Image (spheres, rainbow, N blue to C red):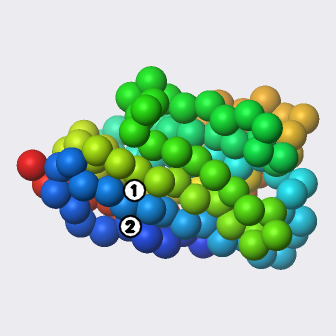
Amino acid sequence: QVQLVESGGGMVQAGGSLRLSCAASGGTFSDYNMGWFRQAPGKEDEFVAHIRWNSEMTTYADSVKGRFTISRDNAKNTVWLQMNSLKPEDTAVYYCAAVRPWKTATKLSEYDAWGQGTQVTVSS
């Protein structure tokens, strides 16, 4: 089972950028599709972005499309989320998650593994 550790969160002003990283260990990274989710206080987790194991396809939530970019490097066992033009409503704990390619998963709990999360706070 893969283990995931996120980093790169922090506090930024609206309009700023952050780059989140997620390092994988304990498994074969290229065996997994990867996703990013976020959870704001008092809200359910929300899908943010997804990338296939071979980077051939990416998908985004409408709320982040055109501002966020997901990418991965299987040689480095790492997936990133580049976040530009940040808004206060992007404030949340961000989680990366791994899922086997043959599984259908739309919620964080349906993924095979996820990290401890990293806090992103965007001030207005």
Q: Amino acid at mark 1?
A: Val
x, y percent for residue 27? 87, 69
**Image mark for residue 25:** none
x, y percent for residue 22? 60, 66
Instruction: In the rendered view, tell whether residue 91 sits above or below residue 80.
Output: above
Q: Which residue is mark 1?
A: 93
Image-based side of 32 in relation to 11, left or right: right
Give the mark nearer the N terminus: 2 vs 1: 2
Image-based side of 68 in relation to 104, left or right: left
Residue 114 showing in the rendered view: no
Mark 2, secondary structure of its residue:
loop
What residue appears at the point 69 percent right and 66 percent down from the top-left corner?
A: 78
What residue appears at the point 47 percent right and 54 percent down from the top-left corner?
A: 82
Q: Residues within 10 Å of mark 1 (few under 14, many from 20)?
A: some
x, y percent for residue 58? 67, 35
Image-based side of 70 in relation to 2, left or right: left
Q: Residues within 10 Å of mark 2 (few under 14, many from 20)?
A: some
Q: Do residues under tags 2 and 1 come within 8 Å of each other at their CB atoms?
A: yes
Q: CA distance from mark 2 to mark 1?
A: 9 Å
Q: Quadrant of residue 106?
A: top right
Instruction: In the rendered view, tell whether residue 33 sits above or below residue 94.
Output: above
Q: Amino acid at mark 2?
A: Gly
Instruction: In the rendered view, tell whether residue 59 sits above or below residue 101.
Output: above
x, y percent for residue 5? 60, 72
Residue 102 showing in the rendered view: yes
Mark 1, secondary structure of its residue:
strand
Depth order, front residue of 122/4: 122
What residue appears at the point 69 percent right and 57 percent down from the top-left corner?
A: 72
